[in-house]
Image (spheres, rainbow, N blue to C red):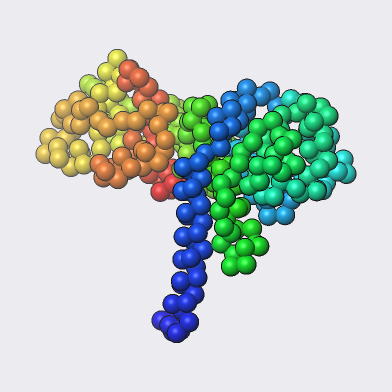
Amino acid sequence: MSNISSADPIIFAAARQVLTTEAEALHLLADHMPPDFPAVVRLILSTKGRVIVSGIGKSGHIGRKISATLASTGTPSFSVHASEASHGDLGMITPDDICILISNSGETQELGDVLAHTRRFSIPLVAVSSRDGSTLMTAADYKLLLPPAPEACPMGMAPTTSTTLALALGDALAVVLMEQRNFQPEHFRTFHPGGKLGAQLATVAQLMHGVDELPLVDMQSPMDQVLLEMTSRGFGTTGVVKDGILVGIVSDGDLRRHMARLMESTAAQVATLNPVTVPPTQLAAQALALMNERKITTLFVVEQGGTPVGILHLHDLLRAGIA
């Protein structure tokens, strides 16, 4: 156990003050959204190019995060370093693009060449700043003015509250654009194929065993044939079909329940009818939740109408990193 220092209450109080200051600023922004915000959303939705985000210093870091969030949620975007832009990277910015420039003061000299480039080639310019009458805001076509709020830094100098506001405004922009584009989980996975997030967004179709591996028998199949199918496929279960439609399953539990007259029975007499199934389009994470709820390890995958197209085992989810 760590020792509690007498200075800890002072440390906690200072940290809470920072968080409270920034939280109050976020509430202020929510209550005073920039009037041009809807117009910027419509502008981005209609653009043929990309959203170019630029800033310098802490604003540059915030700009890169905003750009990355936009790009990963369906809005093509990249960040241009303001200083590098003056040495050739202006060529990345085309007349089909939109520029978002971030500067708390609105007087950042390093943004001058990017600003001039947008004016020269009639590239729409969106400014994010706390000073309405600044050079940047005066030149911009669209103004996203941040409300006046004190920096959380005790000297009022280190960018803290101002960068939090800019970042939050960028998040709001990205999320609203997602909603306007009807951005769905399957779209999200396109841009997030790796890691835990990619696994959580995988669909059943991407993880299931296909038709060639399906254990299936007819309703009137004798149990020796059912047992052979269960054993050869290795899933510990088999589907029971009628006219190509899945109507039941035979599991190890069904075998035990009918042990007395098992070999005298047919698949239909032993099977559990109307089994739990999932469509191929369902998220694998949802299939896992269903397995946990029903305490089962295997799910048959059926298309609309009941035609079996695959089978999903708990081990498939474990290998994919979902379970």
Residue drawn at 11 percent across, 39 percent down: 260
Residue 277 position within the rendered picture, expressed as x and y whole percent measured from the top left: 31, 30
Quadrant in which residue 203 is drawn: top left
State the image coordinates of residue 198 (x, y, percent, origin top left): 52, 42
Q: Nearer the viewer, residue 226 or 39?
A: 39
- Count of numbered marks: 0
Q: In which quarter of the view is residue 229 placed?
A: top left
- Figure check: 144 above or below 19: above
- 205 shown above or below 28: above
Left or right: where does residue 112 sit relative to residue 73?
Answer: right
Residue furthest to the top in view is: 243
261 lies left or right of 210: left
Residue plotted at (36% across, 38% down) = 287
180 to the left or right of 113:
left
Q: Nearer the viewer, residue 246 or 112?
A: 112
* Residue 282 placement (x, y as % from top left): 40, 31
Is 62 located above or below residue 262 in the figure? below
Image coordinates of residue 41 in percent, x first then y, are: 58, 29
Task: Tell me what residue is drawn at x 46 percent, y 72 percent.
Answer: 12
* Closer-to-camera residue (226/275): 275
Q: Is residue 221 visible?
A: no
Q: Is residue 304 visible?
A: yes
Viewer-nearest residue: 108 or 235: 108
The quadrant in which the N terminus is found is: bottom left
Question: As drawn, which residue projects farthest toward the front?
Answer: 133
